[in-house]
Structures are given as C-alpha cells and as structure tokens.
Image: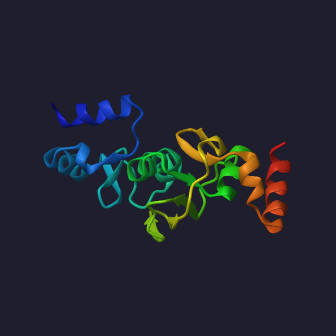
Amino acid sequence: MPTLKILKDFQDQGITAIRSKSLSRTHRERLLKNGFLQEVIKGWYLPVSPNTVAGESTVWYSSFWSFISKYLNERFGNDWCLSPEQSLLFHVGNLTVPDQLIVHALKARNKITQFPHHTSLLDIRARVPEPENVTVKNNLRLFTVPCGKSLQSESFWGIFLCVYSSLS
C-alpha cells in the first residue's frame, strides 16, 4: 500500500496520534523524511503538513487533547483519570492546554514526560475513582464533578469560579 494512502487512512479514521508500531519502518521513515510526520516523543507521532514550519506550535496545540487521550488509553487502558482540577476545568469547557497535565493512574511511574512546546505530563501513581465517579468526554477520563469538587482545596475554588464565571 502506498505510504500516503496509509497516512490518509489514519486521518480518515480521525487518528491524530500515531504509534511507531502502527507503521512499518519504511513508511515511517518516508513520512518523516518528507515532512508528513512530526515526532512528539519516542515512538509517537502527529501527522503534519510538509509545509509546517519547524517549531510551529499550531499542530501540537490543536491536537493536544486527542493525542493525550490516545497516548493515555494505550499506556493505561481504562485505569487512569485526569487530575480532579483538570477534570473540573474540562467540565466547564476550559480546553486550554496546560503547561503540565496531571494524570492519576495505578500503573503510573510518578514521572514527568516532556512534550513539545514546553508542555509536559506528570503521571502520578494513585488510585483512580470508582467507575461511578468517572465520566468520559472526548475519550478523556475525568473525575465526575461531585467527586472532583470533594477533592479540591479552597485556593483552587477561587481560580475555578473565575474561569467558570468568565465562560457564563
């Protein structure tokens, strides 16, 4: 199958996070060489236009949440959840890409993974909420609002209320 056809199939399926094992080495090298893939971290790529200027952040920021959901689902299956703070922000429609996304997972390594454009993921080894306290939006596993609220400090609520009131 031609290399660009493979890439088009990924795009037609809405796949924005491509694992290296999803492509043969030949196809991956061709796509990288010709500027159709951009490495995010070792073994993970985003499809890009070959006209994308090196260092351009638009592709990363526009693909962030779909990349994160694919990456975390591949890494942890259903055993992960965004932090309570990030979950609450997501519930009110704040899709701003954080400098550091915090994720709770039983199989986490308490490690920071650096992503492009000074963003990162901190995976914290922690229990995830019971299934009835998790909701899935855009393939992201979130604390439900009541569960997330119960785990917040007073300082977060000042920030949360400012964000929420600005969206109303």
Residue 70 is left or right of residue 21, and the answer is right
Residue at far bottom of view: 111
Where residue 42 sits in the image (x, y, percent)?
31, 61
Where residue 64 sits in the image (x, y, percent)?
50, 50
Where residue 122 sits in the image (x, y, percent)?
52, 66
Quadrant where the C terminus lies? top right
The image's colour scheme reads: rainbow
Q: Quadrant of residue 101?
A: bottom right
Residue 165 in view here: yes
* Depicted 166 relative to depicted 2: above or below: below
Residue 47 in view here: no
Residue at image position (47%, 45%) is: 78
- In front of the other: 58 or 66: 66
Quadrant where the N terminus lies? top left
* Depicted 49 relative to depicted 114: above or below: above
Where residue 61 sits in the image (x, y, percent)?
53, 52
Residue at image position (67%, 47%) is: 90
Q: How many marks?
A: 0
- In front of the other: 101 or 84: 84
* Depicted 138 relative to depicted 115: above or below: above
Residue 6 is left or right of residue 143, and the answer is left
Residue 39 is left or right of residue 134, and the answer is left
Residue at image position (41%, 42%) is: 16
Residue at image position (23%, 48%) is: 21
